[in-house]
Image (cartoon, rainbow, N blue to C red):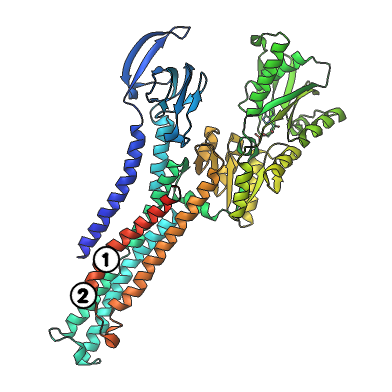
Amino acid sequence: MMISFILLGKYLEIVAKGKTSDALGKLTQLVPDKAYLVAIDTDGNIMTETEIDTQLIQKNDIIKIVYGSKIPVDSIVIKGQSYANESMITGEARPVDKSPGDKVISGTINENGCLLVKATHVGSDTALSQIVQLVEAAQLAKAPVQQLADHISRVFVPIVVVAALITWLGWFIPGEAGIYPKHWIPKAMDAFELALQFAISVLVVACPCALGLATPTAVMVASGMGASQGVLIKGGDALEKAHKVKIVVFDKTGTLTIGKPEVVSAVLFSEFSMEELCDMTISVEASSEHPIAKAVVAHAKRLRQKFGSCIEEVPDVDDFEVHMGAGVSGKVGDRTVVVGNKRLMHACNVPICSEVEKYISENEILARTCILVSIDGKIAGAFSVTDPVKPEAKRVISFLHSMGISSIIVTGDNCATATAIANEVGIDEVFAETDPVGKADKVKDLQMKGMTVAMVGDGINDSPALVAADVGMAIGAGTDIAIEAADIVLVKSSFEDVITAIDLSRKTMSRIRLNYIWALGYNILGLPIAAGVLYPIAGIRLPHGLLVLAWLLPLLAWFLRLFCCSSIKNLFI
Ligand code: AMP
């Protein structure tokens, strides 16, 4: 009977696992089998077109995506205009506008015109493959709470065998020695048989399956649910830690703010003309990936056009250097150009006069960032950059407060701008002008105070802090390095998913705890009854009850798991 129950338990477990694998299988099926490989001329006109297997697509191949078809590999649009349905990857229901230069994700659907795209990531490098790999790895990696269940199950079996042996001895020896009344032994039995029945009852009743099965299933369901909501959890460990989070550290640019900065004004502070300032700024900033650099370059190009310059004429940069969280520098011709914040200017021994100071403070009060440009050790001009706060940021911060979680900003930007943003969204603590290592150190400081810290960031400069934090959350639209460093990836880049991740973890952990209480409570109650403690008082022996209980046991475990799965799912319906 016991072997049947164990097999039944295993069978139910496989059914549950199969369901999650089905979900992953469906994800991989999103990729079409065939694709149209095309050759184009210099004007982008199609010269030849061949249907090939998706697996044969190489990086940089040009693929034609017709209306209504699925995109085979991650690529970049080079011709055409369309809308893509990316809901299967990001959870975002609205179709996303796609035009030349935009990225498209494999497995998503082209919902409008015809696109020509250039493959950027193929095979196991596509976002879809990475998601599948992440979810699979997450499901294999055991959460500490799961390891506890395994550990308990491991010591549980010998304990139960010993308890059964003691039960047998406890009934057999007194029975043989005539310590308890002879009429306690049923007519058709002797003391040996009675003792054996109690011992078997103990063995059968003590079944740790509810404990062993419910925990991994809850973790699996939670990571599956997270993935379908655009919250990729890279392992049970992250899922478990997220429920203990007491403080969330936010990066500013691209995390709290939209991350698409725009230049609102440009000024000159020296004898250089605006055209010269723009030329040199573009030369240095064009090599930087920072969103501020992109905004500055775009604005400088517009200004140059206004002055009638041709974009191709920008001089080259030598000795280009990135100063993480501060700016960039390089040599343009024989001039040394530094573009960045005040801290960088101090580090490069560039003096800042009162006129510049005034311009900086006027802008910082308005939550704008001032990007200073120094040429040959003198401030030549400045750009004032604004990056609006995400509309949902205030709501998310106040919701986190209501969950008992406090928030702080850690940014490389200046204190006045960071404070203005903090006031706008309702964050009380600000750590500004921090370099990437400083961000990680701040996280460690908070951990030293005994707090479980979550870090939310998007950039390369957030990576050390994302790794240092108990739970690192990367905004999906951020850099690959940040996504690599994080424990949880918010694929939709939606700020609200910080709450989704923490809430999912809290609900999952409370279900698992409930499962423990059920499983242990059942055993604590059932074992003494099975061992016959009620037999002398009430004549209760388990052979009949035992059968019922034994049959109910796998069912009980199964219902517990269903309960735990559905209650997690219900959170999101
Ligand atoms: P971050 O920590 O990436 O937000 O950067 C902190 C600050 O450094 C920014 O607010 C800018 O003032 C400055 N900064 C960083 N990179 C650049 C860049 N490429 N160009 C100009 N300023 C930069």
Depth check: 28 or 556 in front? 556
Residue 544 - label: 2
Q: Residue at x 48, y 32 (%)?
A: 94
Q: Which three-letter amino acid code belongs to the residue tagged 1?
A: Leu
Question: Do callouts 1 and 2 mark residues in contact (Cβ within 8 Å)?
Answer: no
Label 1 environment density (alpha carbons within 10 Å; few <14, some 14–19, many ≥20): few
Provide residue 147's location: percent of width, then percent of height. 41, 57
Label 2 environment density (alpha carbons within 10 Å; few <14, some 14–19, many ≥20): few
**In the image, is the residue at mark 2 within 8 Å of ligand 1 by its beta carbon?**
no
Depth check: 41 or 164 in front? 41
The residue carrying mark 1 is 552
Residue lying at the far left of the rendered structure:
188
Looking at the rendering, the quadrant in which ligand 1 lies is top right
In primary-sequence order, the first of circles 1 and 2 is 2
Horizontal relation, residue 367 to residue 457: left or right: right
Horizontal relation, residue 328 to residue 152: left or right: right
Q: Which three-letter amino acid code belongs to the residue tagged 2?
A: His
Q: Quadrant of residue 282?
A: top right
